């Protein structure tokens, strides 16, 4: 069984082709960027037959729209020189990342007209993402008319949260009529690393309590009790919770009103400020964690305090989620920063010995691949680094759905 996973943005399509019958092997992957702009870019990687790696083909030129981009992807997948398959009919299903499923979707689902309408209905909840996801669904449907399409939702994993965790203290009618509530995001990543943690610990996921920490340019945490999400840091939008690359995370709800009054900024300007010009970027001028750490090492005080604020927010949520869970089996770090920034992991976990969370500095600073355990031998809860693979999780969920 071969499954193509697609993640569509407003001017991009990321893709990965898996052979699910051969150890979930990645047969090909790539991205088309700057669709509809003067110069578009395509990078395609094909797995070499001897398993030694990938060869890469790059192209640039005008790609007018997403349909043309999808056609280019298919041409490369079946190309006699760079292709991985002989015919697009070899693809059993296409799995789509869809950011917001609202309350309509608690699990992945085969895409039909009613599903498309429900995704459209949730556009107000994710105006930057759901329209692009719908474009991907449309062009894939035209390109693969006889192939099953499956939607996998970022929000689905968090739909097990109890009402006390997802409701805001606003008039209840605003939730009932307009769906205003906490939804959470990065659910595919949190679900994937939770499952991998259970495999590593050789225990059923349903018996584990975990705190999962996804740290990329966007960042979120989840409290997982007996295998199910019971709380998460992001809210109705991906702005809430942790300090991120360019997003503020949690702030005083009255701050936008204060900013509007004292800085003469419009709602659109404030939205841009909180989403694009805050977080690490706002605090020290860079949203690249590697640059921020380099600045700190060079003596930059703004970078130092930015990192302290970043880690302090994470540490506070670890404490809060420990209280929610009652007991804890493991803390799991993932994504670009979570997997590759030992300084951040140490800053987040230092001083948590009273909760039974004790990091081993030597193990934390060791370079390695795959799952790594960085807790001290005496730590009651394990501290793990688990590389995330959202595309593989989407492929696995797609396979599960179409085999029902």
Image (tube, rainbow, N blue to C red):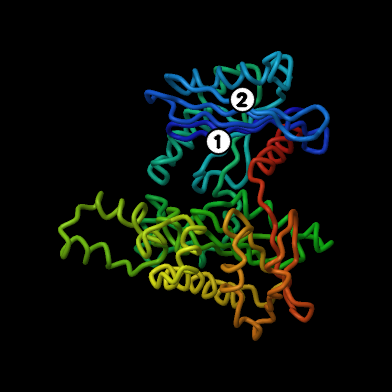
Q: Which label sits on residue 334? A: none
- Looking at this view, is 291 or 223 the one in front? 291
- Looking at this view, is 304 or 329 the one in front? 304
Across and down, in percent, residue 168 comes to 41, 64
Across and down, in percent, residue 326 comes to 65, 77
Q: Secondary structure at mark 1?
A: strand
Q: Which label sits on residue 57? A: 2
Across and down, in percent, residue 283 comes to 37, 65
Quote the CA–CA distance across marks 1 and 2: 20 Å
- Does 88 appear above or below 50? above
Identify the image quadrant of residue 24. top right
Q: Which residue is mark 1?
A: 7
- Looking at this view, is 99 or 375 the one in front? 375
Q: Residues within 10 Å of mark 1 (few under 14, many from 20)?
A: many
- Does 318 appear above or below 335? below
Identify the image quadrant of residue 204. bottom right
- Residue at the (33%, 70%) spot, across then down: 252
Residue found at the far front of this picture: 298
**Horizontal side of residue 272 vs 342, given as left or right:** left
**Horizontal side of residue 8 vs 24, given as left or right:** left
Q: Residues within 10 Å of mark 2 (few under 14, many from 20)?
A: few
**Horizontal side of residue 2 vs 123, given as left or right:** right
Quadrant location, the N terminus: top right
Quadrant location, the C terminus: top right
Residue found at the far bottom of this picture: 354
- Upstream in the sequence, badge 1 or badge 2? 1
Q: Secondary structure at mark 2?
A: strand
Across and down, in percent, residue 164 comes to 51, 67
């Amino acid at each position: 069984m071969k499954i193509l996973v697609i993640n569509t943005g407003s001017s991009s399509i990321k893709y990965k082709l898996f052979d699910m019958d051969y150890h979930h092997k990645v047969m090909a992957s790539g991205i088309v960027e700057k669709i509809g702009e003067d110069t578009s870019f395509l990078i395609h990687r094909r797995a070499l037959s001897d398993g030694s790696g990938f060869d890469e083909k790059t192209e640039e030129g005008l790609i007018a729209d997403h349909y043309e981009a999808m056609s280019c992807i298919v041409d490369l997948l079946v190309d006699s020189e760079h292709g991985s398959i002989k015919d697009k009919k070899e693809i059993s299903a296409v799995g789509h990342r869809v950011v917001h499923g609202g309350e309509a979707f608690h699990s992945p689902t085969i895409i039909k007209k009613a599903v498309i309408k429900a995704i459209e209905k949730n556009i107000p909840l994710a105006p930057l993402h759901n329209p692009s996801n719908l474009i991907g669904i449309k062009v894939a449907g035209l390109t693969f008319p006889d192939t099953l399409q499956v939607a996998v939702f970022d929000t689905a994993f968090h739909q097990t949260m109890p009402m006390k965790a997802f409701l805001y203290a606003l008039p209840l009618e605003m939730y009932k009529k307009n769906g205003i509530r906490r939804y959470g995001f990065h659910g595919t990543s949190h679900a994937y690393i939770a499952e991998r943690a259970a495999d590593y610990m050789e225990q059923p996921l349903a018996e584990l309590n975990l705190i999962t920490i996804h740290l990329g340019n966007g960042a979120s945490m989840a409290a997982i009790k007996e295998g199910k999400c019971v709380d998460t840091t992001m809210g109705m939008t991906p702005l809430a919770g942790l300090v991120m690359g360019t997003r503020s995370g949690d702030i005083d709800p009255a701050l936008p009103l204060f900013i509007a009054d004292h800085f003469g900024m419009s709602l659109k300007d404030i939205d841009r400020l909180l989403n694009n010009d805050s977080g690490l970027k706002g605090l020290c001028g860079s949203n690249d964690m590697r640059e921020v750490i380099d600045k700190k090492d060079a003596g930059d005080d703004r970078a130092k305090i930015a990192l302290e604020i970043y880690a302090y927010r994470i540490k506070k949520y670890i404490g809060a989620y420990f209280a929610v869970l009652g007991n804890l089996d493991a803390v799991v770090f993932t994504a670009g920063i979570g997997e590759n920034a030992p300084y951040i992991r140490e800053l987040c976990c230092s001083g948590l010995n009273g909760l039974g969370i004790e990091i081993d500095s030597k193990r934390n600073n060791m370079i390695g691949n795959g799952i790594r355990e960085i807790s001290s031998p005496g730590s009651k809860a394990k501290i793990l680094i688990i590389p995330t693979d959202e595309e593989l999780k989407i492929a696995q969920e797609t396979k599960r759905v179409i085999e029902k």
